[in-house]
Amino acid sequence: MIETLLIIDFGSQYTQLIARRIRELNIYCEIHPYNKLPNKVEGLKGVILSGSPFSTKATDAPMIELSKYRSKTPVLGVCYGAQLMALTSGGDVQQSEIREYGRANLSYIDPKSALMQDIPLQSQVWMSHADTILSIPDNFSVIASTSNVKVASYKIENEETYGIQFHPEVYHSTDGMTLLKNFAVGICQCEQNWSPDSFVESSIRDLQKQLGNDKVILGLSGGVDSSVAALLLHKAIGKNLHCIFVDNGLLRKNEFNQVLESYKNLGLNVKGVDASAEFISNLSGISDPEAKRKAIGKTFIDVFDREAHQIEDVNWLAQGTIYPDIIESISVKGPSATIKSHHNVGGLPDYMKLKVVEPLKLLFKDEVRRVGKALKLPSNILNRHPFPGPGLGIRILGDITVDKVKLLQEVDHVYIENLKEAGWYDKIWQAGAVLLPIQSVGVMGDERTYEKVVALRAVTSTDGMTADWVHIPYEILAKISNDIINKVPGVNRVVYDISSKPPSTIEWE
């Protein structure tokens, strides 16, 4: 039976980061919103209560019945979670002048505390709270303080229940991983056996049990997620997996043929479908980003459904859904209004009448890559930069034409090949070019030009939730710009995007 740490989400921006840190300890955990908690969690070893943008004193503050967990399993309250336990136990939580944001240092640590083992005095922690625990009940004891906040951490007597008013999951809490390990391994007694190899082994076994001799279809994209999902399913059900790779006319240069060639060596049953003319036709005259996504999504479903009907007795549709997709679709405030329409959670039309299987729905993006490595996925697929589902359709700002697609394919090809030649491709999480809906005056030879402007984007990230722009050396950027302008007719200006996420997004549309 799998061991599980339950993370109860009260809406904090850091909740996923808690889960990622626990997974880094090779311990399995799940996030569930406070208002959609499961009746039972398999192998429950402990509970972590997340932070929240809410105040515990607000009329609409998130609440749960804590007695369901306290005294029955170890509990760690982080920020809001700590304040909630203190308040509901009779403590005093208020907005006050005694509050902290940003870096702080622990000026007192209880050396006997199991939670605080191996954390030194003056350890830096990251605070982010307007409310503060001003007093605690008699059966609570302070186990850590800062110079400004006495109750930086507490323990409840006769329970393995703890609260901390700082965020151990963030990078700026220098001993945060030690604290989380103390809780998960030392207090909860979790075994550190959640690994790519164990995931592969258990997933194949579970997929065989779930699918039996049924046939499954999967839409391949050439990216890491769908490729890893395909390999897992292939190992579980072999030739009963039917993969379809659709060319939507919005792929990178030569990508359709290159990807099909890569899959040949993996033993996968793959059919390539060139539907580029159909996609481009259905995008004619559409400029709105969301309208483009919907047109691309609808066309894909039409093409995919048409191809699926050529395979007899199919029962299942496989999707490369990963854990951040699942979390966002069941967020504290309900499905996020910002989820894009090409999101693959719940995107199956009713008329296809297929059940859905999602082999990667428990994994974060970096975990998918580790599983892919364990499955011996070729490096040219494993290390490929992420590519948006709508492809170049959302990297061409404005309406889509064949000429614009060809131009951006050439620009992107020159950009990526230069990054590879300079040894920078594998240092970057995602890179791509954007065709802007403007023209720029230029001079080539003795003639004035009035041609296209392209923007280059390159970011570092782990899972795309946050990202920072890459400081590519000027001399490499200069060569890339020069090559694009000289080799791609119709472009006379290249700019480089130096925006982080947040506040910007990785893609422009």
Image (cartoon, rainbow, N blue to C red):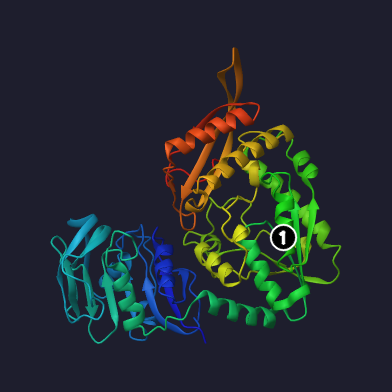
Q: Is residue 51 visible?
A: yes
Q: Nearer the viewer, residue 83 or 487?
A: 487
Residue 148 falls in image quadrant: bottom left
Rendered position, 99 above or below 248: below
Q: Is residue 361 visible?
A: no
- Image x and y of residue 65, in percent: 38, 76
| Quadrant of the frame with the C terminus | top right
Q: Nearer the viewer, residue 143 or 331?
A: 143
Residue holding disc 1: 219
Q: Is residue 224 left or right of residue 13?
A: right
- Image x and y of residue 9, in percent: 42, 66
Q: Nearer the viewer, residue 452 or 186?
A: 452
Q: Is residue 4 left or right of residue 450?
A: left
- Image x and y of residue 154, in percent: 22, 74
Q: Residue at x 57, y 72 (%)?
A: 374
Element class at badge 1: strand
Q: Is residue 477 left or right of residue 243?
A: left
Residue 362 falls in image quadrant: bottom right
Rendered position, 330 above or below 279: below
Q: Residue at x 32, y 83 (%)?
A: 187
Residue kind at label 1, given as amino acid type: Gly
Residue 155 falls in image quadrant: bottom left
Count of numbered marks = 1
Rendered position, 352 above or below 506: below
